Image (spheres, rainbow, N blue to C red):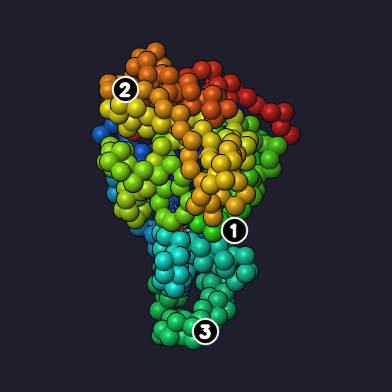
């Protein structure tokens, strides 16, 4: 009976999809509130592996309404391919709704994303090259095209002419490229528009209705807290708001209608793309984590940078998202190590100790992690169903992380499967039972 936001507490790829999938039976709606097909998550059901980029993973539950909300940017071609691919495997899309206010990613966005990265050279952001940043740029510059307009041929043509005139000026005059043809683009994208038209709705109204009258909603974040445009490691961030506040502006729901915020974190840290990463491991241990954790991007296949868990980051995530609890995953990956480190604070080159993220974190190449070293565990933990079934050292690790993060851990994940989730205390039950006095 609760409206719950699920966010990434690190730099993305925390396996939020698994948490959403686990909670989905308890709600009536799953809403994706930001990002685009730069995101990618995998959900394992039995022996089947499903990969999602834009479609909420809730689609695996036929009782749910799944919404791609206003805060998302949509590559229509990619979405059509994703829907058709999943339909081919028997998933039902009758309950999919796409926000009329969501913005469209067009070929010039992808092109400009790649060209901008090339121009930045060594200073490149390491974007996914999916056109996400340029699409959000156009949204803010008010020359974007929204799904509601995209699926109306006359309005699409009108908006595309305005945008293309500007984009072609940039492509030809700044980058010395050929202009894009209006006719070719309009023709190709009108076909996608026709396929997506039945799904397009005023989803803010649907979400409000469900928030008030249904068993509850899961607001599914993409990316993670430190990739937030305002709160993350700017400029090495994405162009949307993966933090809990993004669930409100990205869907049209007011903050007072949110009952709980769950922050998903791995038992270690990963990052894709450039930027600061104090606990990064460039050694054998980093490789060990990468291989055991299959830390390669779902969207781009890029190897993820891997490092120890950083509780400075978790405390920051708890603060800016107002976390109700953490969901700590990938604990199985750390098995086999003699010792595990947890970053508790940073040391500056001047010898100062920082317990909190400095405001200029992105540029602080001088900070070193201060670690607490805990004994590792050799045993496989992937079949554990309770905390007590974990090896003593793994239990100790979890308890210490909880103390250092200053946030309750609601669930632990010991493998990709639905059943490989350990519910730690009454937090989840309390969350699911919480219903605010709603109008
Ligand atoms: P963009 O979102 O493609 O513009 O990329 C901006 C930054 O966010 C880059 O460092 C990307 O690697 C990172 N990023 C975007 N989406 C994800 C994600 O789903 N997981 C992890 N990193 C991401």
User: Residue at the location (58% across, 38% down)?
Assistant: 353
> Mark 2 = which residue?
377
Spot occupied by residue 100 in the image (x, y as percentages of width and height): 57, 58
User: Residue at the location (44% across, 73% down)?
Assistant: 119
**Closer to the observer: label 3 or label 2?**
2
Badge 3 marks a residue whose secondary structure is helix
> Mark 1 = which residue?
101
> Mark 3 = which residue?
169
Q: Residue 208's mark?
A: none
Q: Residues within 10 Å of mark 1 (few under 14, many from 20)?
A: many
Q: Are marks 1 and 3 in contact (CB under 8 Å)?
A: no
Decide if residue 22 is in sight here.
no
Whether 109 is drawn above or below 354: the answer is: below
- Apparent side of residue 312 relative to residue 181 in the rendered image (left or right): right
Image quarter of residue 434: top right
Spot occupied by residue 163 in the image (x, y as percentages of width and height): 55, 76
């Amino acid at each position: 009976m609760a409206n719950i936001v699920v966010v990434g507490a690190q730099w993305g790829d925390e396996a939020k999809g698994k948490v959403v999938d686990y909670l989905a039976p308890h709600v009536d709606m799953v809403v994706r509130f930001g990002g685009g097909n730069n995101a990618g998550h995998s959900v394992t059901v039995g022996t089947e592996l499903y990969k999602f980029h834009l479609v909420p993973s809730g689609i695996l539950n036929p009782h749910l309404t799944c919404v791609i909300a206003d805060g998302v940017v949509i590559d229509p071609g990619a979405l059509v391919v994703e829907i058709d691919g999943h339909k081919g495997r028997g998933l039902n899309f009758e309950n999919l709704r796409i926000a009329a206010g969501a913005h469209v990613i067009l070929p010039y966005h992808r092109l400009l994303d790649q060209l901008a990265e090339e121009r930045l050279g060594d200073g490149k952001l390491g974007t996914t090259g999916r056109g996400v940043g340029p699409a959000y740029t156009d949204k803010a510059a008010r020359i974007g095209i929204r799904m509601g307009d995209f699926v109306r041929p006359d309005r699409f043509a009108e908006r595309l002419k305005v945008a293309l005139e500007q984009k072609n000026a940039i492509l030809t005059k700044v980058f010395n490229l050929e202009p894009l043809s209006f006719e070719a683009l309009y023709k190709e994208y009108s076909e996608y528009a026709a396929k997506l038209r039945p799904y397009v709705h005023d989803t803010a109204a649907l979400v409000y209705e469900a928030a008030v009258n249904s068993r509850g909603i899961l607001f599914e974040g993409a990316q993670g807290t430190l990739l937030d445009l305002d709160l993350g490691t700017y400029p090495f961030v994405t162009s949307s708001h993966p933090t809990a506040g993004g669930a409100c502006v990205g869907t049209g729901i007011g903050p007072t209608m949110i009952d709980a915020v769950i922050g998903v974190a791995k038992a270690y840290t990963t990052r894709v793309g450039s930027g600061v990463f104090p606990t990064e491991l460039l050694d054998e241990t980093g490789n060990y984590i990468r291989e055991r954790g299959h830390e390669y991007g779902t969207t781009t296949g890029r190897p993820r940078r891997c490092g120890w868990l950083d509780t400075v980051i978790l405390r920051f995530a708890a603060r800016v998202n107002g976390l109700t609890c953490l969901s700590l995953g990938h604990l199985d990956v750390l098995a086999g190590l003699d010792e595990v480190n947890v970053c508790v604070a940073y040391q500056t080159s001047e010898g100062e100790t920082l317990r909190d993220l400095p405001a200029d974190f992105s540029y602080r190449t001088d900070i070193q992690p201060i670690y607490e070293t805990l004994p590792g565990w050799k045993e496989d933990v992937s079949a554990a169903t309770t905390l007590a079934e974990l090896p003593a050292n793994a239990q100790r690790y979890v308890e210490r992380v909880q103390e250092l993060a200053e946030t309750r851990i609601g669930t632990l994940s010991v493998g990709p499967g639905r059943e490989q989730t350990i519910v730690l205390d009454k937090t989840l039950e309390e969350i699911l039972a919480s219903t605010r006095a709603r109008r």
